[in-house]
Amino acid sequence: MNKILDLRFVIGLFFSVVALLLIGYSFTTDSVAAKNINRWCGITFIIFGVSMIILSFVKDADDELLEE
């Protein structure tokens, strides 16, 4: 339950879902420009989303101080 309350996890999950939608849509559209834009934005969003999810699992020094 604590991961749902962590803002980094929620932001990472949101960007990852949007990235998967963009990448999936890039394979179904006919326009070449839309394919390129959606793929590059999807790749950027997935990198950002996964990095936010990884950061939510990494313990910070501040988190350890608050737990004591």
Image: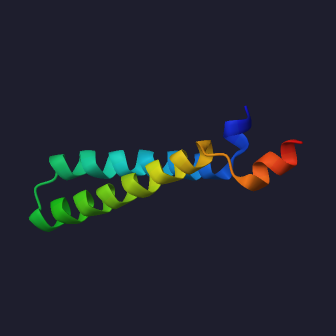
Considering every residue shown, the one lying at the far right of the view is 68
Residue 31 position in % (x across, y down):
11, 62
Compared to 33, does 11 lie above or below? Answer: above
Q: Which image quarter holds the C terminus?
A: top right
Residue 62 shown left or right of residue 27 in the figure: right
Considering every residue shown, the one lying at the far top of the view is 1
Residue 17 shown left or right of residue 14 in the figure: left
Colour pattern of the rendering: rainbow
Residue 10 shown left or right of residue 35 in the figure: right
Residue 15 shown left or right of residue 26 in the figure: right
Front-most of 51 and 58? Answer: 58
**Picture residue at 52% right of the left edge, 45% below the top:** 13
Front-most of 45 and 65? Answer: 65
Q: Which image quarter holds the N terminus?
A: top right
**Picture residue at 31% right of the left edge, 52% below the top:** 22
Residue 57 position in % (x across, y down):
60, 42
Compared to 27, does 40 lie above or below? Answer: below
Residue 26 position in % (x across, y down):
20, 52
Q: What count of labels does the image hold?
A: 0
Quadrant assignment, res 40: bottom left
**Picture residue at 69% right of the left edge, 52% below the top:** 60
Residue 37 position in % (x across, y down):
23, 66
Front-most of 64 and 11? Answer: 64
